[in-house]
Amino acid sequence: MTEVPVATLLSCAPMAKIDAGNQTDTDITSISVEAEVERSSKFTAEVHAEHFKKVFLDTYGVTLGNWAKAAIAKNTTTNKKNCRILALPHVGCNNYKLNLDMESWVSVDVELKQTLESITSTMKSAKNSSLKNAAILSLLIDLKPVLYNKTRWSEKFNTFDRFIKIRTDLIAAAAGNESEMEVEDGLNFLCTCEKYHRIMKRMNDITIGMQKSCVSLLYCRRILDYIISKHETDTDNPEKVFYMSTFTPNRIKTDGPSPNSNFETGVTKIQDGRYHELDDDERAAVRTLLVEENNVEEEVFADESGNDDDSFDALLRCDPAQRMGGSNHNHTAAYINCNFIFGSCAEVESLWSIAKNILTDNRKGMLDPVVF
């Protein structure tokens, strides 16, 4: 029976037979840092690739290289090398790209950092610094102050969002004789908070939209193209979300340094039924998606993407069938239906979050983790 350590971040390591050295079941929860470093050094892209090929051949009876059409994964060095070994086009996780752009923006915008520091100071004084402050605030509102960690930019949005919601109550609590809180109550500060809150809320909605189940590459591309277009047109309009925004969309652009950009743009056109618009480079990149026998019928399809705010909000709220592809176009004319090529690997991340509650010592008898 395959043993599955419960205290390792190397999720696939037990499946690929990368053991924990000389550790036993009794001390597996206290693996040393040195042991983990040594263990992770064995779990290379080559080992990862061989594991995938073995599982598909032994368990499902298929050769991975002949069956798989693409690999959707984060843009890490290991993932990219893994795809090169497997000879599969690597489709970068668009949610991950957007998060990287947001992290860059949050870390370099001086005004945003100063505003966040002021809000955090207020939240700390209301939450942790004094029981008296927390007691006074609890008499005014049920919502509690929220602090962020440094892991994700969305945590900073949650802090902004909660501050906007309870700002009036924080000011009222700070005005009390027994309060020790200090709250920035100026109008200029409020306007600055609302400016950043609008942008971060929109980006948070977009991030959640790309974390839904079965989001096609086309769906993600339309969302990211919306961000890029608004960044280019709305920065001078005081009524728009991106007014005076310093956010810069670098990694989410299609003309970035991705070695498989032609494959990605080609797939989006196929998913949108616009295979007749493929250029020579894109046609060569997606040749593995051709059906063996086809009768190509040239059709002209309307552009349904739209960039106005109303149609974009409708895109974020669309049902799963619409997220799978851009339209009901006939994909079988020249290419296979490739709506299975997603634009985000958030669904896989969610699977691993679920797996942590299954692949444990207490439940390892339920199933073979290789099959899982």
Image (cartoon, rainbow, N blue to C red):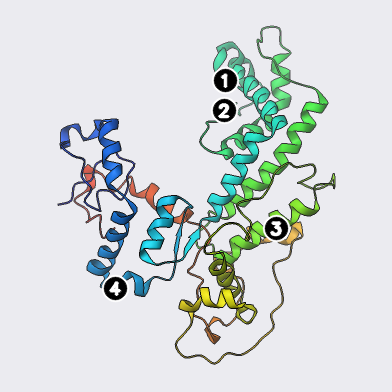
- Say whether marks 2 and 1 touch (CB < 8 Å): yes
**Label 4, on which residue?**
62
- Say whether marks 2 and 4 touch (CB < 8 Å): no
Task: Pinpoint residue 87: horizontal percent, then vertical percent.
Answer: 39, 67
Disc with the residue nearer the chain's start (4 vs 1) = 4
Element under label 2?
Answer: loop
Give the label, 2 or 4, closer to the camera.
Answer: 4
Disc with the residue nearer the chain's start (3 vs 4) = 4
Kindly report the distance in space between the C-alpha atoms of the residues bearing marks 2 and 4. Answer: 49 Å
**Label 1, on which residue?**
127
Task: Pinpoint residue 64: horizontal percent, then vertical percent.
Answer: 33, 69
Kindly report the distance in space between the C-alpha atoms of the residues bearing marks 2 and 1. Answer: 9 Å
**Label 2, on which residue?**
147
Question: The disc labelled 2 sits on which kind of residue?
Answer: Leu
Q: Is residue 140 left or right of residue 13?
A: right
Please rate how many residues cluster around mark 4, counting C-alpha atoms within 10 Å: few if below 14, some from 14 to 19, many from 20: some
Q: Is residue 36 above or below residue 333?
A: above
Disc with the residue nearer the chain's start (3 vs 1) = 1
Question: The disc labelled 1 sits on which kind of residue?
Answer: Lys
Q: How many marks?
A: 4
**Label 3, on which residue?**
226
Kindly report the distance in space between the C-alpha atoms of the residues bearing marks 3 and 4. Answer: 39 Å
- Quadrant of the rendered structure where residue 94 is? bottom right
Question: The disc labelled 3 sits on which kind of residue?
Answer: Tyr
Task: Pinpoint residue 243: horizontal percent, then vertical percent.
Answer: 80, 44
Disc with the residue nearer the chain's start (2 vs 4) = 4
Disc with the residue nearer the chain's start (2 vs 3) = 2
